[in-house]
Amino acid sequence: MSKAIPEPVTKLIDAFSRLPGVGPKTASRLTYYLLRAPDDVSLKLSDALRDLKAQTRFCSVCYNITVEDPCQICSDPRRDHHVIAVVEEPLDVLAIERTGSYDGVYHVLHGAISPVNGIGPDDLRIRELVKRVQEGGALEVIVATNPGLEGDATAMFIQRELAGKGVKVTRLARGLPVGGDLEYVDSVTLTRALQGRGEL
Amino acid sequence: MSKAIPEPVTKLIDAFSRLPGVGPKTASRLTYYLLRAPDDVSLKLSDALRDLKAQTRFCSVCYNITVEDPCQICSDPRRDHHVIAVVEEPLDVLAIERTGSYDGVYHVLHGAISPVNGIGPDDLRIRELVKRVQEGGALEVIVATNPGLEGDATAMFIQRELAGKGVKVTRLARGLPVGGDLEYVDSVTLTRALQGRGEL
């Protein structure tokens, strides 16, 4: 075994295996791919990994990933700082930014409450959100957690924590996805769409 | 867009995306996982990637991945240097070593002939194999390429190249996998098992 695989190779297989969704087979496949690929493929990845933590940090206001602190969104005077969209992940910020229809600011929780995975409110940036609201300025908190069990539990928790703090707490609308087909929509979504029906 | 994702993050997503089987979604997921994971997860991966090419090379005899040249198998006097097992990938060497029932040496082709993927005989270490056989010493070449279309084509090519060079060319036996269930074996394998049947 030790004769057949040199140590630099097993080390990389081990390091890849620590990534989520990467098993030992995928880790071997990636490693042997890189052995044959041009040097710059592995070196660029190596450099990018080294720079990731060295050059980024969490914004001290919204906890999004950023190079400068506070982040470009939090320090942008053209954004509406009275409205805070609370999301689970940095990628959710990107999704909302892509719509081009939101000009408020964000608060990134870095996860959702999930008893199964041992993630409680204290593991998320909820305390920081409450503090941010208490310090004033916010008029509305839009809870934009994912529309599922964990996102809902997180939304309920946040709503309770912010109750009586003089801020409006709203949640993204549930309903039919645009372009979706009624026939294929799951019944929970359809029920929500019926409950949330609006006048034409 | 540029506001929502800092450059070190997009750079890592790009670098991950260049790996085979890793799309932009998986690349984002891995990157954001690493952002939250302890520093040493990304740093260990970064170091392992940097060391992979710097500390390994191809064995000048068998073209397996190695730290020393020639590799530990090629320089081991207890191995039978008259028998060469020809495999497609370094991982195949490992598979054969694990059986503990082979004491010959290896020759790693680094692929198989695949016109679909534009891989011809010249892209593999076949010329080096022929040269190695011509230089003498080898009595048997066991073609241990994968039992599929490309492995078969490669085996046929090697057989033709080595014909008349005074070396016995053999191929791994086809048949029922041990522990397999006759009911679920595909008919090509079953046909091969029938054709290759032996006396009890």
Image: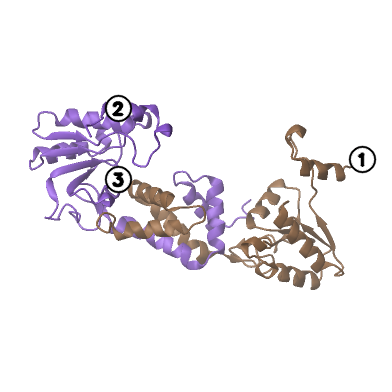
Chain colours: A brown, B purple
The amino acid beneath tag 2 is Leu
The answer to whether tags 2 and 3 share a subunit is yes
Q: Is residue B62 left or right of residue A199?
A: left
Judging from the image, mark 3 belongs to the subunit labelled B
Q: Is residue B161 shown above or below A129?
A: above
Q: CA distance from mark 1 to mark 3?
A: 66 Å
* Marked residue chain, label 2: B
The residue drawn where x is 81% and y is 71% is A136
Viewer-nearest of labels 2 and 1?
A: 2
Q: Which residue is mark 1?
A: A199
From the image, tell me which residue sits under label 3.
B92
Asked whether the residues under the numbered discs 2 and 3 touch, taking CB atoms below 8 Å apart as contact, a structural biologist would say no
Label 3 crowding class (10 Å Cα cut-off): few <14, some 14-19, many 20+? some
Residue sitting nearer the eye, B12 or B52? B52
Measure how far apart labels 2 and 1 are at the Cα level.
Answer: 73 Å
Q: Mark 1, mark 3: which one is toward the viewer? A: 3
Q: Residue A89 at x, y = what percent? A: 65, 57
Residue located beneath label 2 in the image: B194
Residues indicated by labels 1 and 3 sit on the same polypeptide chain: no
Q: CA distance from mark 2 to mark 3?
A: 26 Å
- Left or right placement of residue A53 versus residue B191 in this view: right
Q: Secondary structure at mark 2?
A: helix
Given the image, on which type of amino acid does mark 1 rest? Glu
Looking at the picture, does residue B26 appear above or below residue A120? above
For the residue labelled by badge 1, is the local secondary structure a helix, a strand or a loop? loop
